[in-house]
Image: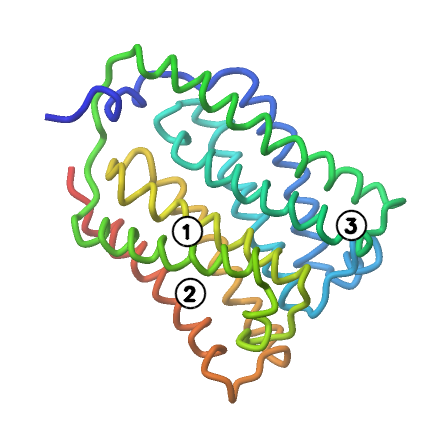
Amino acid sequence: MQSRSSSVKSVVPVQGPILGLAAVLVPVLVVAFVMLYIVPDFGERFFAWPISPLMSSMMLGATYMGGAYFFTVVLLTRQWRYIWLGLLPITAFAGTLGIATLLHWDRFVHERLVFQIWAALYFAVPLILPVLWYRNKRLADHADGERDGEFPQLSRWAFGALGAILTIAALILLLVPEFMIPLWPWTLTALTGRMMAAMFILPGLVGLSIASDGSWSSARFLLQAQVFSIILMLIAAAIARDNFDWSHPSSWFFVGGMTFIVVLIIYTFLAKRE
């Protein structure tokens, strides 16, 4: 028998404030993707700060495009059961970038409009989104519904283990980026290391959430967004291959790890239980 709290997401609509936030974020994320991934030279001259090398820029752009995909799902489905699992990991992503901004304030180009948008988002979203999540969840807790399929047990264990590894790596990158810099496949600074922390804590917490919840409806669009982002990251690795130190095992570990996540998600889609 499924618990009431875990079954209610199937009939509750997404509240208006979350839809409004999604409507704002989608175009912002798409523009950021274009600046950082499609025309990174333009982004280096006009983004919130000049990100280098190319791989770091394209990594963040790929993450933004995955976010644009997810928030488009929010706008199109408008159903709480499809999106609730992703909102707190997104809060952690935004909060980590907000912390990085404060710690490296002098690295940003404050007079640029893009920086002002950056600062507004990463200082406001970590405060606003958990409140909106809680308000919508309270509605869900008083509704009835049914779970829509279950994750294979192997997938739940794999996502849980992967989520724990990524979350730990993200915390190390956030707290002591100097420890990770010499181990990284391409050149990092303390700021880009903390930026990587944000990009790792997002899938890390998603993996832990999937392992805990196990509901297919709660995670399938999240996983689609993850696959979209990771494929873009693998393409970026091919384009920016000169940024990598291919004599270092971490370069192969990075590419192999990203490929493993894609394979795991594809396996989960094929093996899910109704």
For image coordinates 52% across by 41% down, the residue present is 92
Classify residue 6 by image quadrant: top left
Which residue is most to the top?
Answer: 142
Residue at label 2?
258
Residue at label 1?
204
* SS under mark 2: helix
For image coordinates 36% across by 16% down, the residue present is 12
Which of label 2 and label 1 is nearer to you? 1
Mark 3 touches mark 1? (CB < 8 Å): no
Q: Nearer the viewer, residue 122 or 9?
A: 122
In space, the residues marked 3 and 1 are separated at their CA atoms by 26 Å
Q: Quadrant for the N terminus, please.
A: top left
Which percent across, then down, holds residue 242? 63, 81
Which percent across, then down, holds residue 89? 46, 40
Give the mark nearer the N terminus: 2 vs 1. 1
Residue at label 3?
105
Instruction: Look at the picture and state if 51 lies above or below 122.
Output: below
Left or right, residue 202 beside residue 236: left
